[in-house]
Image (tube, rainbow, N blue to C red):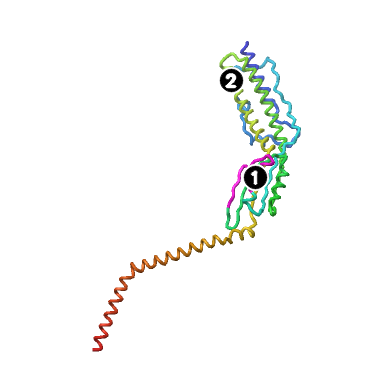
Amino acid sequence: MKRFLFTSLVLSTLLLSACSPFRSMSGSSYDYDDYESTSSGYYPESEGMMGGDKYMADSTYDLAAPSTSTTVTEDRKIIKTGSLNLHVESVQEAMPVITKLVEDAGGNVDSSNITRGYNSYSANMTVRVPSDQFDASMTAFKEQAVYVESEYTNASDVTEYYTDLETRLSNKQAEETQYLEILKKAETVTDILSVTQYLSNVRYEIESLQGQINSYDSQIDRSTITLYLGEDESVSAVSETWKPLSTLREAASDWIVFLQGGVDGLIYLVIFGWPLLVVAWAVRRWLRRNRKAVRK
C-alpha cells in the first residue's frame, strides 16, 4: 500500500510539472519556440522517462501543484551597446585619458591594442561601464576627439525574455521542492534512484536557467562600448618624418659605411691587383727591347 501511494505521488508530480506554463506573458508577440532553440536545458518529461517505471499507477494521493504565478518585473530590462570611431591628436595620449574616464565611471577596460602605421598610430578598445553612465561616458569619449568619424548606439529591450526565464526558473524550483519532499518518503532503493534521477535533471535545468539570467544581468547592468582611435595623419606625418637628430645619426652611419667600403676596396685591390701589375711590367719591358732592336 505504501509503495502504491509513493508511486502515485511521483506520477502526480510529473503530470503537474508537465502542465506548468512556459509562457510568462499572454498575448505577447514573443515566440517561445524561437527562444527555446537558443537556450540550453534538459527536459525529462519530454523524453519519456516514465516509460520504464512500472510502479507508477493512477494517483489517489493529492499533491499541490507547482507554483505557476508569473514573476512580475517592475523595471524594463534594457541592454545598451555603443561604438565610436574617433580621430584624436595623439592615440598614445588619448588611451590613458579614456582609461581614466572609464575607471572614474566605475567601469573597466576589457581589451585594448595599439598599432603603428607608416605615419600614425591607431588603437582599438572595448570598455564596459555601468548602464546609468552609458550616455555620460559616450559624451566624455567624444570630447577627447578632434572629430567623430562615426557613432552607433543600440538599446535592446529584453524584458519579455527575462521575465520568461524568471517564470520558468520559479516553476522548476517549485518542482525541485516537491521532488525533495517525495524523496523523503521513498523507502526502496529503486524509488530513491528514480526520484534522484528526476531531481538531478530538474537541478540541471535550474542551473541552465540561472546561468542565462546571470548573463542577462551582466549585460543589463554594464554596457559595452567599442572604440576605434585614429590620428590625424596630416599632423602626425610632420612629427614622424622630420627628426633632425635621427637624420644626423643616419648620415654619420652612412659615412662610416662609405669609409669601410673604401678600405675594403683597397684590400681587394692589393690582393687581386699585384699579378696584373707584374704582367703589365713584363709587357712594357718586352716592348722596350723590341723598339731598341728595330732601331739598330
Q: Nearer the viewer, mark 1 or mark 2?
A: 1
Judge by depth and name the residue closer to the eye, 245 or 79: 245
| Residue 106 percent location from the top left of the image | 68, 39
Q: Residue at x 76, y 32 (%)?
A: 74
Separation (CA) of disc 1 from disc 2: 55 Å
Q: Which region shows up in magenta?
A: 95-115
Looking at marks 1 and 2 on the same chain, the residue that comes earlier in the sequence is marked by 1
Q: Residue at x 57, y 60 (%)?
A: 243
Residue at numbered disc 2: 194
Quarter placement of the C terminus: bottom left
Mark 1 Cα shell of 10 Å, populated few (<14), some (14-19), many (≥20): some
**Image-based side of 196 in relation to 134, left or right:** left
Q: Amino acid at mark 2?
A: Ser
Farthest top residue?
A: 1
Quadrant of the image occupied by residue 55: top right
Farthest bottom residue?
A: 296
| Residue 131 percent location from the top left of the image | 71, 39
